[in-house]
Amino acid sequence: MMKKIRERRLHFMIFSFLLGIFAGINLTYTLVAQEPAHKYLDYFHRVYQLIKTEYVDEPDTKDVFFGAIDGMVRSLKDPFSRFLDKDAFAELKEETSGNFVGVGIEITIKDGQVTVIAPIADTPAMRAGVLTGDVIFKIDTTLIKNKNLNEIIKLIRGVPGTRVRLFVNRKGVDEPIVFELERQPIKVASVTHAVIAGKRIGYLKIKIFSADTDREVEKALRAFNQKNITRLVVDLRGNPGGYLDKAIRVCDFFLKKGDTIVTTKGRTGAGVIEEFKSLESPLYTGKMILLVDQGSASASEILSGAIMDNKRGSLLGEKTFGKGSVQKIFNLNENTGIALTVAKYYTPSGASIHGTGIAPQHAVPLIIFSDADKKHLSAIYREKVVEQYVKETKCAYTEEHKKAFAEFLRRKGMPLTDTAARFLLKTEIGKLEKRPAYDLEFDTQLVRSLELLAKD
């Protein structure tokens, strides 16, 4: 097998998130002679001629062929491969720029269900309480079973200021939850950083791997170095992925020169292997822990795998999403194309995490709600109890108001543990405020990472 090792020759290939952010102009076609294709091409041509000559109404030629292309791609049964018509192509360009109109969720098809990979920070979905793992089954009045991602995205997106209702099923909650969200322009700010108050530990949150992520991470790490911060938490929770080259560049900041970052492999027998290695000395050499969860996908899993397999740091949290495939876009014209899965990626140890994810060395669940709490959550969400309480009382997040809210829930027959009640109250009050870089009150994973880093 021919092996091609090309360090940094990315050909604009990137890992997708949500419906995928794809780039690339390379056009290649390979004919695999598994069985005679001309027989099926004859069928195709025959059906087209029948439609053109016999169908009761005059068909639109473009619609016929675009429908056929869409059908071919759907037959792959791969949620990350899709036909990009004019609208989908335009949406793709918006996503690539980091600016689009929507509600702020990254979704995929998982086990046949439309599943939230992660809500984007400081967006309507995040503020409303949409969570990683939520399964969307209806949008407004439309049941979305058997619809592809292009169709689903069109239902969710729309004119800024208009509203959309998402009906979701959530693990541990008996009844569906309805979120009514206002569509807004979404600007993805990819990086925030801070020094944990009272500790000599840095906190770096990477929300997504966008066009500016490497520069923003470099700026943050240089600031930590100037302050002599030698212990660092890198938070990748809810990071759905992004550009491959940006993830590789961020790996450069932490790994030794020559360390393997990721390997991509195409179809078995095709012989194309690309191996990416760190090209520079590390910018940051301090001790580090990466926080991950089920919303950490694609490019964030590349960083996680590279750090763990090179023994540069440890992972803490929950198993990652498991999105380990590579997509490229093939242009049909300037406005249409197809996004096609062309390879899978492997961590430095040679593991493929596609469909399985990466298990952290330190398994720490983020527990907010007990089983007893979950018995009342359906009614609390359905009746918008917290939203109405905060609106009517205009309360603040003080000890007095925490106790009053917990008592209010008990009187309504919806008692929660103190932790759950405080979490709901704080989340609702904070919807209209700018969120801090970190919050230690409920974040058991971040607290545990600080404990481990403080041991040295």
Image (cartoon, grey):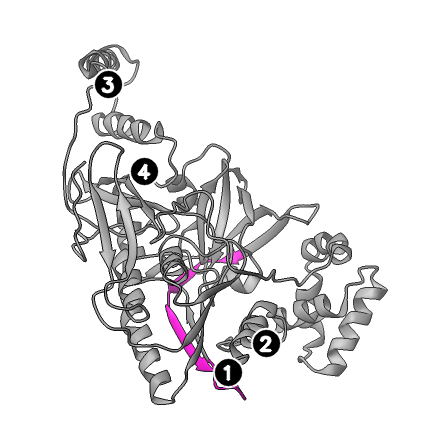
Provide the secondary structure element on which disc 2 rests: loop
Rendering quarter of residue 376? bottom right
- Taking the magenta stretch, the answer to whether it contains residue 20 is no
- Pointer 4: what residue? 82
- Sequence order check, earlier mark of 2 and 3: 3
Q: Residues within 10 Å of mark 3 (few under 14, many from 20)?
A: few
Left of 338 or right of it: where is 413? Answer: right
Q: Are marks 1 and 2 in contact (CB under 8 Å)?
A: yes
User: How much space separates mark 2 and mark 4, taking CA atoms?
Assistant: 41 Å
User: How much space separates mark 4 and mark 3, taking CA atoms?
Assistant: 23 Å
- Pointer 3: what residue? 34
- Pointer 2: what residue? 440
Q: Position of residue 261 (x, y in %)?
A: 30, 58
Q: Residues within 10 Å of mark 2 (few under 14, many from 20)?
A: few
Q: Tell me the kind of residue under disc 2.
A: Leu
Q: Position of residue 45 (x, y in %)?
A: 20, 15
Rendering quarter of residue 374? bottom right
Q: Exactly how many numbered labels are in the figure?
A: 4
Left of 278 or right of it: where is 319? Answer: right
